[in-house]
Amino acid sequence: MIYEKAIFELTNSEIDLCNNLLIASPDRHIFNDIRLHLRIQDYYKNTVEGNVLFFSSNGNITAYIIIYHIIGKKLINYFSPYQKSLITYGGIVCSEGRSQQKIYLKELKKFLRRRAIYIKSIPGIDIGVYRELGFKINEKQTLYINTQKSEKELWSEIKNRIKWNIKKGYQSSIRVNVIIPKVIEDIEPLYEIYRELCAKTGLYLHSKSYYFSILDNNNFEHSLIFYAYEEEQVVSAMAVLQFDGLIISWFGGTFMKYRYTNASSIIYWEIIKYACCHNLKCFDLLGLDIQNIAFFKKGFGGYELPVYHITYNSFSCKVFNKIRKLIVK
């Protein structure tokens, strides 16, 4: 059985329930943390509606999935996650483990009726049940580094071209500072760097207040910003997330005029060292979709894990879309 609740209407007990289910899930991930989605929904409340689908078994709620749809669209298509928000992974969070996943996916299909859904999975999940139930699967990759090794071992796994960049950067007096963002001024250099990147690449740029809201550590400690300096000038930055032994490079970049400093290579190496020193298990470099960026990331060693882009259109949704196209013609 499923019941749906808007994110901004969740009670404190329902928020606590989501947190408890996430902690108990073998597939727990920061991108399924309801506290992060509460901040996102507050920003998007006039354009995108976020909802939580709760799944119940024997009278108890044992799973949930966070879904979004664009307000005002005649055809409702759901997204888990809404990637424009910078949330990268979504999917069902289940306290009972993967054994009950088939039951929940069947319930999800019933719920969809004349609607469709897109899910981007957390890395490395078992995709077999999705295939069995008729979901379409497109496999991509992300890169993980096992940081439960010595710094010496981690350095030995880095490609020589990246080692050269790191050494050259340090010789040029690049230094890195790590901050815990708690006031909006903490993210200003990061925002300026990311704004330049968005202007160059066409990535969507939110307001500065949005980035602060998703990075703010007041009442929810989950993020860090790694800043690289040449003398007193910030030249590169990376926002990272920490959760359950995992560290994730989220978003950032380097000012174009300072790319010669190799500061981005140093920042990634400093994240690896930070994870090693703080006994974190893994570093997720968050995707290998863009060829030149993938080449850079693979220079740090690690191993690839599959990330699945999962879609489902119900039969009635397909029929409805065909009829609609005929009417429009």
Image (cartoon, rainbow, N blue to C red):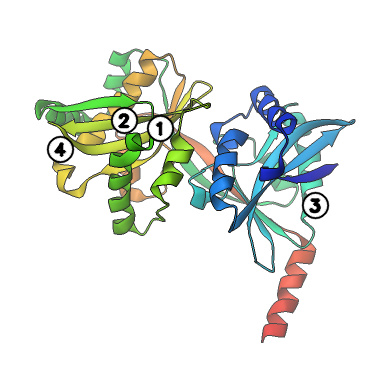
Q: Mark 2–mark 1 contact, CB under 8 Å? A: yes
Q: Residue furthest left?
A: 172
Mark 2 residue type: Phe
**Coordinates of residue 102 in the picture (x, y in percent):** 77, 39
For the N terminus, the image quarter is top right
Task: Name which residue lies at 44% across and 35% down.
Answer: 215
**Depth-wise, is mark 1 or mark 4 nearer the camera?**
1
Please tell me which of labels 2 and 1 falls first in the chain: 2
Q: Amino acid under label 4?
A: Thr
At 22% from the left edge and 46% from the top edge, which residue is drawn? 255
Circle 2 residues within 10 Å: few <14, some 14–19, many ≥20:
many
Which residue lies under the disc numbered 2?
226
**Left/right of residue 19 with respect to residue 243 in the rendered view:** right
Cα distance between the residues tagged 3 and 4: 52 Å
Provide the residue designation for mark 3. Answer: 111
Q: Which residue is mark 1?
A: 240
Q: What element does badge 1 sit on?
A: strand
Marks 4/2: CA–CA distance: 15 Å
Left or right: 227 as drawn, with respect to 250: left
Disc 1, disc 3: CB below 8 Å? no
Asked which secondary structure carries label 2, the reply is strand
Callout 1 amino acid: Val
Q: Earlier in the sequence, mark 2 or mark 3?
A: 3
Q: Earlier in the sequence, mark 3 or mark 4?
A: 3
- Residue 313 shows in the view: yes
Q: Which residue is mark 4?
A: 261
Left or right for 126, reference 240: right
Residue occupying image coordinates x 42% and y 15%: 148
Instruction: Write down the quadrant of residue 34 in the picture.
Output: top right
Marks 1 and 4, the one that precedes in the sequence:
1
**Residue 106 visible here:** no
